[in-house]
Image (tube, grey):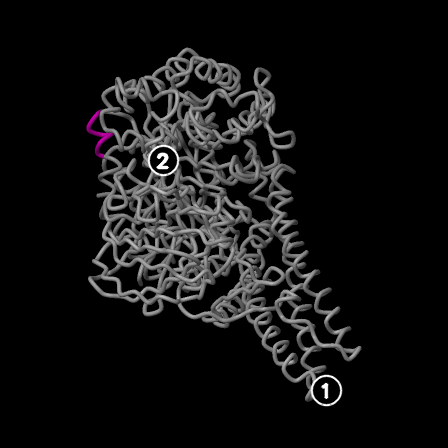
Amino acid sequence: MKRILTFLLMLCLSKGIFAVNIVPLPYLIEVNGKTLMLPKTIDFEKLLAGDDYAAWKSLHIGIRHQDKSFDMLCRKLGFFTHEVGDEGYELLIDNKQIVLAANTEKGIFYGKQSLKQLIRSAKQNKLQGLRITDKPAFRYRGVMDDISRGPVPSKNYMKYQIRRISELKLNMLCYYTEHVVLTQSHPEFAPPTGGISITEWKEIEEYARRHFVELVPNFQSLGHAEKVLQNPKYRTLGESNTMYSPVKPEVVQFMKDIYDEMCPAFSSGFFHVNCDETFDLGRGASKKLADSIGVAGVYARYVNQLSDILRNNGKRMMLWGDIALQHPEILEMLPSDAVIMSWEYGDQKSFTAWIDPFKKKGFDYFVCTGVLNSYRLFPDYAQALPNIRNFILEGQKKGALGVLNTVWDDGGLHSFNRDWYGVAYGAEHSWNPNNQPVGDFDSRLSAGIYKNAGTSLFKAIHELTEMGTIQALGGMSEQVFWKMLIPRRGEYVSYSLADWDRIYRQCLKTDSILSENTFPGFEQEYAAIQIVSDEYKYLSLAKLKLAEAASWYAKACCVQNSDRKEASQLLDQVRTNITCCREQFSRLKADFEAIWKNENRDYWFNYAMDPFDAVQRNYADLLASFDQSVAYFSQNLPLSAPADIRLDIRESVGSYFTYWLISPAFSLTSNKGFDYDFLAGMGGEEQAAPFPGFSFIDENGQNIKWIKYSSPLSDRVLLNNALDAGSEAVAYAYCTLESPDDRESIVYLSVNRSIALFCDGKLIFKKRANLLLTIDEFPVPLKLHAGKNRILLKIEKGTTAWDFSFSIKDATIASSKNKYRIK
């Protein structure tokens, strides 16, 4: 019966016959054809915020079995014929009254959220008659906000987050925490303006509880420990400089100290220990034990100790599931009450691999989706929405205990206010997984949550999402925004101008969409979306106008003696372009600063603003250098060379790969020349397939760790920026290149000294070059198979420079960090 009613409801929604403007979409809706007029004299938001409904006699709200007359009314209306549990409710609207009933205060709270949304979206003060029977699909419906790899939200903003997510019927909030908890036992590692004290955690927890949100304590207890280990007092706790050692008793004691202080501040029965991405496990102090009982045994032994500590504090351990998926034998050794947080953020056809291993072993587990924000100017909603919808739907079918929708904040340009759309979409599917069109969700979200402010905010989000597919934006990577536009003195930069005029026009379209409606009460969220368009408008103009200025300046240099009037006019145009770019960037910086300060504490502010300050200094120096050159010209002296005033800007063509995983430098010796395989400890050059954080032990017992590196230039990679090496050295660079089919493509290589190209372990090309790098010097035919191809470069250092470039010109390339894809 429920399926039939749901089908009829969806059919009516799709045809616009009526609209039930509630997010999340209720479990069961029946329309009765009646209409209720709302009195204009009543402030319903204020009325529903309390528990005294005497202002309007037609409103009846109550909890089952607490009032005989209310129970009689419910029986008369046929309420409680469906089981709605602790969080569900029943709501009736007819031409005489509104009746809201539930089994608990929490159910009443959620019912009120739905009623408020219906009232907000009512047209001409008319409420559509209907009956809603509603209950959630999952016991736990949560959001995780990363507050350790960038900004730390202010206390006021944390309370704002709690209010917003409770309105969306989310009932769990977890702040991912590495070092921003301030304890009495270990106060040294918390940043002075970013540490959240136990007293403050208690205050936030109590505020969350009043909004029926369970605040789950969280402390990263194994990997991603670099911020704590940077403190001299705690360096001895490390297995490496990024991971706690799981075999040192002092580490377990350290965790016990932290847990013992944090646990009493939270009423939640859970504690999230994380323990993910443990790349160095078994490589340091734990190696001896790992050689004896295996890496899985070391991991399980450690997390069992953590579980015991938490159990003694009345908490149940949550931990990420990635390590258990890599080493399935761990599942035989984990405590049976552990809750596995299974994360995967891709748009997968099936999530069986992330669900079934835990389900088969009988563990309680959460499906953990992602808003996909890391190092981006804007979330990847094209991937996030299907990830959220499909992972949650499969989790529901297979009995997941809950959902945790994650928002990761790594990157300097982050603003949580960009993420509310993804948070709301996660709330929708956590309460009621469905396959409704996104347009229907947008309409309900606009009317119910955004108080009928129109859908322009969501149209702009979709426009920016579509814009993110343009090749030049590199998947809207933050690295693209910070690529060097103004060269260093005496050097040049080269970048492609393709697509940037199109990007600018799409930004203007986004601006026009955002101007359609106002968003009273949501101004900061609007500003956080608007600034994304502003960032790309600036970047488009800067690329086009600086390249144009460089071209005009070069022409002025050529005609400075033959036509001084034309040269003078060209120089005026050059200055106008540079000044325009500088002023637009200054406005952008001021807007970003305002958005940052609205959400966050002082901590990390300098990190976020440092790149802005550096660009401003570059503009100031460029203008000063240019003005000095113009002064020379006015004195009948030659104009300075473009490189001398930082205006040697050239146009490039094709897709250059500038984000790689790179190895450390390996010294060349008389018996270890360029042809020596320095990767024997990881299976050799033929087997090389590193991933972020990957490390191996070389023949000298040294831990060799691969690192992520994004070049500041758009057409070449500067290894000297990332690596410290003597005059005779080599290093490796690795990426993957996904092809839709078997094909042969031409890649273009350049290098200062020697270079070798491997594809899927096979040596394709080797060449010794001149010391002066020439872009695109060596065209190399490269056979690619359908799927992912492993690309490994081996690069020898020149006498001083250590640069290389890798490009493809006969295909359109999409990228996500060191993962490239032919479109």
In the picture, measured across the screen, residue 568 lies left or right of residue 137, that is right
Tell me the amino acid under the disc marked 2.
Ser
Of labels 2 and 1, earlier in sequence is 1
Q: Residue at x 36, y 32 (%)?
A: 279
The residue tagged 1 is: 565
Residue 27 appears in the picture as rendered: no
The image shows residue 665 at horizontal and vertical percentages of 43, 43
In magenta segment, residue 606: no
Quadrant occupied by the C terminus? bottom left
The image shows residue 328 at horizontal and vertical percentages of 23, 28
Q: Is residue 335 above or below residue 69?
A: above
Front position in the image: 540 or 339: 540
Q: CA distance from mark 2 to mark 1?
A: 62 Å
The image shows residue 382 at horizontal and vertical percentages of 37, 55
Regarding mark 1 in the picture, which secondary structure is present there? helix
Q: Residue most toward the right? A: 635
The residue tagged 2 is: 695
How crowded pointer 2 is (Cα within 10 Å; few <14, some 14-19, many 20+) is rated as many
Q: Which residues are magenta?
A: 356-361
Front position in the image: 531 or 21: 531
Q: Quadrant of residue 683?
A: top left
Tell me the amino acid under the disc marked 1.
Lys
Residue 216 tag number? none
Q: Residue at x 42, y 15 (%)?
A: 248
The image shows residue 367 at horizontal and vertical percentages of 32, 36
Front position in the image: 561 or 524: 561
